[in-house]
Image (cartoon, rainbow, N blue to C red):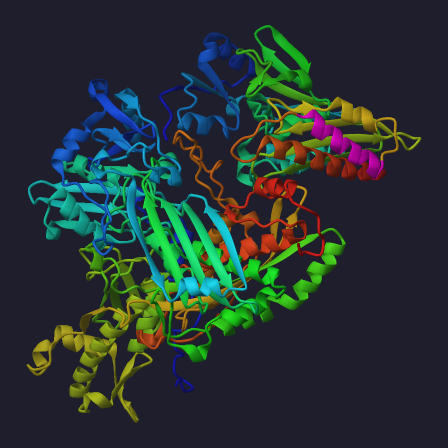
Amino acid sequence: MATSGTRPRAVGRPVKRVEDGRLLAGQGRFVDDLHLPRMVHAAFVRSPHAHARVRHVSVSRALALPGVVAVLTADEAARLCHPWRGILTDYVGMKTALQYPLALDKVRYVGEPVVAVAAADRYVAEDACDLVEVEYETLPAVVDPEAAMRPGTPLIHEELGDNVIYRGGFDKGEVDQAFARAHRVYRDRFVVGRQTCVALEPRSLVAAYEPREGSLSVWISSQVPHMMQAIFARILGLPEQKIRVVAPDVGGSFGLKIHCYSDDVAACLLAMRLGRPVKWIADRLESFATDIHCREHLVDVEAAVSADGTVLGLRSRAITGVGPWSCYPRSSVVEGNQVIRLLTGPYRIRNYKAELNVVAQNKALMSQYRAVGHPIASMVMESMLDRAARDLQLDPVEIRRRNLVRRDELPYTTAFGYVFESGSYLESLELALDKGGYARWREEQARGRREGRHLGIGLSCFIELTAPGSFYGSGGAPISAQDSATVRVEPGGTVTALIGVTNQGQGAHTAFAQIIADQLGVSVEDVNVMSGDTALVPYGGGTSGSRGAVLGAGASILACRAVAEKVRRIAGHLLEAAPDDVELRDGKVSVRGAPDRSLTLADIGFRVYYQSDKLPRDLEPSLEATAHYTPARPITWANGVHMVVVEVDVETGLVKILRYVTVEDCGPMINPALVAEQVRGAVVQGIGSTLYEHVVYDAEGQLLTRTLMDYLVPGAAEMPDIEVHHLETPSPFTLGGFKGIAEAGTAGAPGAILNAVNDALAPFGVRLTRQPITPDLIRSALRQAPALNRDGRR
Amino acid sequence: MKPAPFEYLAPRTVPEAVSLLARHGEEAKLLAGGQSLVPLMNMRLARPRRVIDLNRTQGLAYIREVNGALRIGGMTRQATLERSPVIGGRCPLLPEALALVGHPAIRSRGTIGGSLAHADPAAELPAAIAALDGQITATGPRGERTLPATSFFLGVLTTALAPDEVLTEIALPALPPRTGTCFLEVARRHGDFALVGVAVVVSRRSDGACGHARLVFCGVGPTPVRVARAEALVSGRRPDAAVFAAVEGLVRETLQPDGDLHASADYRREVAGVVARRALTTAWSRTNHG
């Protein structure tokens, strides 16, 4: 399209991030950088017990401490707000208790807030917390998810009758027949440890209440300002138009910052009671104890496989432990539900029966973390494929080739009922094998084994559910299915864009500036994108489910089209041409075929804003438009493949990643550099899941991993070079053909790494089905290994 | 995560620091690099009423070489030691161990004396100093006293330092000629405390046999653990693969580590043997260059 002399399109190029200059110079503006007059600081008395009755609370000594301005008890907090319940109504039979800002009668996890204190500074607030006396009567803790389901287990909420929050499942195709005709049936149990998000910037909030206006402003480190506006309105009993929620710079989120947290509500109540701004910044101890956790799963799986490696059918039974309450408003059932629904991955498996149990326990709340459910589903499936391949003496590649959905089978409907409209499952695999040097690594592996080195190669082929349209709204949650953009040409001809999608490190502002620049024929530098303020931007859903780029781009394109139409009509009038003959390009507005008949956007801006009296009355003096966008399909499917080579030191159990290659297909890329970095960041989190990260509670429900010394996230030394290759299969159903990318790396890593480790350990007859894979786990498995059979077969 | 209230004192001289300690005793805590004390205070696991900051105390940060022996001031930063050509030349075991202590930012603040006085049983420096037959000097109201590193460490986070004493100096004797050293550890991530680690010092006699030998472990007991029977196994022999394997077995049988969140007792015992064999093999190969 672009001819010589015209500016190249911005979309598709690795444009440098517009956000970076300020952030790299340490000039980010995070919630903690906000200092308001008369502001006080909150701290919380938190439960030291996993399960206990609160017998008595005495706050008088805390109140007497100089500098303390308020102490909020649970009874008072309950009177000041409406409790909330994390139910999605489309999960039939789901149940969970009401949640209050502070623990009323019982505490149900270590770290649960019991009393809130506001004081002149955080030091005094913490001193005051030490002076609050709470008398507990401890109760037996429910920790193990399987035990939580058994009759006779102590009840976390007596009024609910049992500890089961949700029981679901489905039975599709002819599962029993598939198992009856199988050549082999493989059964395994996968155990996936709890994790948490570990954002660099902790949860942070400043709440300021103006009693005369009845208005509340909340600056919060959040992915979802409009959702927070809606839930603060419901819980605090304020009308939505009186609540402003601002998410300034946000230092990572990963699903951490899309929930309603008790301490956030309590801090708002303190601000409302005091009429003074209240700041609360979670410290790392609070983060580990009270940020949402994720992932705790048991998955029992059976695979029916034919002699040629075709997967004929699957059965799965998943148990997910989610803490005392289902999280509000997204619930805590989606993670487990996606484990069972996504288990068949990109493979042609027609017969599938699944069961899900979501259970309560005395641990922190569990909910959505990057790649919700995907990594577990993928890991289970990929591991079963490798097991079948080894048993049937097939190459792991070959068994995948035989089962992957082919392009000519699209649109393909999965056993559960998902529809894959476009994708590149086999093509991605072949590209990964080629770029990763699969055949050469197999030779290297054979050579290594002769020398006593233990290399393993792992593959995972996965799908990524992106850009969900309706998802939560259908269950009654105030979570936007659409997203929005306001685009305005300023009088000087530059462009301001206000976007409903939020920015927390992924470079959203850069991506939207590229889209808008192309649509209006201006340069990226001439577009300023803003987001994160409910008083500023049109109603949006923020970020979650890899939706930002797809919905934000769609809304931006629609808004730009409307603005361009206004420009064409006004320019047509000024240039005496038909609007349809006017084109926007290179910052100019000109008549097609007559480039000398042109105006700049600044010429038009001056006329529209300052001389609108000279325009015909039927031309609206406006260069601004707002558009809202929902994708045509409820889900846009992206896909990819990871290939990993590891070396296992069998004497120490240490795993070293030697090669990491990914192929990602998220449709046309807005910015390949942003895509690659999303993938790399997500892969690192997947490496963390698989090899390092583990939230550990003991049998009494005490949290053992309370610091970054105990909860291990991969550091620079643990990150391999991660090679990212791209295929670009457009979605037929989204504007621009875009698909989401944010979660792909996290989805694909665990299966590939587990398979690589198991491949390395195969000569010892060892196969692990647990994560994280610790050195101790590997050593202990090797110690119990049945035999040292060095050809890798049993 | 803010500390409980405390009084901050910054003595300019060692005698001043000692007299402050003598006055406040158990209520006071010395602040060196602060890499352990400050997090403990922020988590309110440590609540000293007074913090005596040694960072402004003169004459505690130095590296001196005297006839091949080394004298190191207690407040010498780990990063300084790591980069010191004198240390690198005379005692390459120290930089090898220091590279495993946390991360560069931690070593820029952290001091050798602070690490020894804190006495974390999984820390690298106590094991390294013990393997080097280090002597630790403490200064108190009754003057100076010097004790060998092996009797300095008494238990988990517990040393022979009296509440009114400052760790002022670490002395390392000259190593025999043709000495090879190696520090090796297994940690979950780079920079973590060791699941198990070992400092090895071996010297090659003129007849080609091993003379002096030291094997000191970290992460396997309440203090650095010296395995004298393993030293005896290599000393007086020309060690080869069979000897190194025998050491591995002996170490595995001798040590009685505890398990924790990051590794079981079985793992530590087993891997202690592995790192002993590997470190000894490397250290012995390095005696050729000594």
Residue ranking furthest to the bottom:
A593
Q: Position of residue A161 (x, y in %)?
A: 24, 38
Q: Residue furthest top?
A: B142
Give the percent coordinates (x, y) of residue A431.
Answer: 55, 72
Left or right: A97 as drawn, with respect to B175? left
Task: Determine the main secondary structure of the stretch shown in magenta.
Answer: helix
Which span is picked out in magenta?
Answer: B240-255
Q: Toward the viewer: A250 or A394?
A: A394
Residue positioned 36% across, 57% down in the render: A338
Location of the C terminus of chain A by quadrant is bottom right
Question: How many dots with numbers?
Answer: 0
Res. A496 image quadrant: bottom left
Residue A596 locus on image (x, y percent): 29, 90
Image quadrant holding the N terminus of chain A, namely bottom left
Q: Does the magenta stretch include residue A118?
A: no
**Magenta run includes residue B244:** yes
The residue depicted at 24 percent of the width and 49 percent of the height is A94
Q: Which residue lies furthest to the right in this view?
A: B207
